[in-house]
Image (cartoon, rainbow, N blue to C red):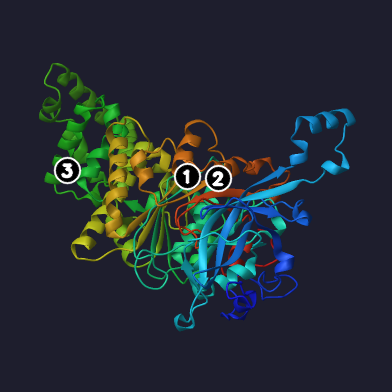
Amino acid sequence: MNENAFDPAAWARLEGPSPMPGVEERTEDRFPAWWDDMASAQIGVVGSPNSTERMSADILMDKTKESLVGEWIAIPFVQDGVDTLTVGQIMSVEMRNDLLEGTTARSVVSRLGKVPASASEDLYRAEIQVTATFARSPKEHGRVVLPSMMGTVPPSGTPVCLVDNTFIERLFAEQTDDLFFLGTAYSGAKGRRILLPTWVRHFRSGEGGAGDTYHMGIFGKTGSGKSVLAKLLLLGFARHPETSVFILDPQGEFSRDAWNLPSSDEGFRLKWGEVVEKGFGKRLVLVPLRNLVLDSWDLFKDVIGQAVLFQWLGYPRGEKRALAAELLSISLQKAGFTLNRLASREAFDEVGKAVCDENFVKRIYVSDSATAKLQQAVGYWEVPSIKEDLWRAWSSMASLFDDKRPGTVSVSTLVEEAVTSGKVVVVNLSREGLEAGTSIAAGSRNILWNEEIQGMLILRLLSSLRERGEIAYLKRERLNTMVVLDEAHRFIPRGTLDGQKEAIRDLLVEASRETRKYGIGWLLVSQTLASLHPEVVSQLRVLLVGYGLNSGSELQALRELSGGDQRAISIYQRFPDPHAALEPSSREYNFMLLGPISPLAFSGQPLFLSAFADPHSFLFANGLGGRSGESA
């Protein structure tokens, strides 16, 4: 036998462990190994010209009617005397017929209205993007395959074969426990789609670890499936015993879906909270806004500035109201009140004494208007009905600081528990968090809530996370925490901001640069890519881009991040709108993947994923239960 000939039998003799979770027991009829039966899996041969990055293949005549764009292929060849496989994806298919490209032939066709028999020799060529190369390892390594590089090009005529699930199973037999499946490889041939292996690793070294912290982003229009994919990814992180997942949920989406409550994910009802607790043996902590306690006087000064109390008293926003909040804070502390006693009648009476004090008012207003403001305040406190309205307004604000309410937890305590105990914590920052949840005390509707209060809570949570990371870093420790921020475009936009919004964005921009060394990663979920702060986007190591960013500045941003790969952009632009499906059950949620997220792409070339469209397929593929018969 020629020593340079590829020996498919040698690959077939390599034995690995039992099939990966989610891949059914091997049957020769359903999962023929392509190296055992190359004739049935072969779709073409290596053509010309070719390079080590992009190759072309001449498609076999009986395969020309099959949908091939997006299909994964493997090409066997010999490199440095070692059996080698290069893996890639078909990016486009082109048909040419030299007999029909001349002027004379076109004239004949236009007259006859058909193609003459002699001119029917169409040639189909597939353009292939090479993504990874593997070499059969020497016996002393004790492994099935080793990563390699493509240092030469397979000769023309080399078989080009389709990849199937058994190929993936054998190729990554040693990494079975390290792989996680978010869906299938996107292609036109749904019946041949393979499970796309991905890495969802924790941030430390050792088993299942990346040895480094990384940030991720999920982008797409509303309805593109980004929330579904985010929940699958957070489960990928949560499966690691020592990894914490901290979710900031400004719309309540993750909180609702944790236990299959009504949500916007139509047709996808994954009880991911049950998977966390029963599948991974972790504790899931759902914290509604009603149960979150603010824990600093600085926050009190910010929050009281948003309460209706000062609005009723006629104190305008800005310096006047900020000074009034500062003086009121001092008065309450001098009177011996702690934050958790602010919601008491005694504290409210002290507030009345302060705002009805002449010296208090004159420190804010040095003009003659001080007398009018003082009279207004005194008048309000003397009328029982108005005073009762003021009490309700004060109580709604002060309740945010009351840690005696059942089920409450302070921001600092919550962050400490989340980052040190490997829990999954969801903070529901939406208005729902005031009115829903099993641990909410009576009277929750009386808590002050608006977008500015929500922003303050997010700012406090983010600050506490960063502080906790800094403490660990100074102790030469690293956390192992993935922070999920939904609706990220609301908090990290481009352009000019002011006040609290600017403070939140600046903190997040700093966090994207600094928290990697603390062991804190970020998973940002956003409806837009181009409108995010560019420095944050530049820090993202992995991007998953769903349907909808295919025009204007969004497409330009995507083109830049994909390295200007126009063929990849063309595939992305062909993604169908999930809501254009004839039936909800046939919707597809497709994503372009950028970055080192799959062992099938060493250099982070763009990959294409069809995310699982039903929970059973996801659970089954990852060995978490479910049923194999569901469509992906």
- The tag on residue 568 is 2
- The tag on residue 562 is 1
Observer-nearest of 466 and 145: 145
Q: Earlier in the sequence, mark 1 or mark 2?
A: 1
Mark 1 lies on a secondary structure that is loop
Q: Are marks 1 and 2 in contact (CB under 8 Å)?
A: yes
Q: Earlier in the sequence, mark 3 or mark 1?
A: 3
Q: Position of residue 409 (x, y in %)?
A: 33, 57
Q: Position of residue 115 (x, y in %)?
A: 85, 38
For badge 1, the amino acid type reads Ser
Could you tell me if residue 294 is visible in this image?
no
In this rendering, would 416 be left or right of 94? left
Q: Position of residue 77 (x, y in %)?
A: 58, 67
In this rendering, would 80 be left or right of 47? left
For badge 2, the amino acid type reads Ala
Q: Which residue is mark 3?
A: 332
Mark 3 lies on a secondary structure that is helix
Q: Position of residue 242 (x, y in %)?
A: 37, 69
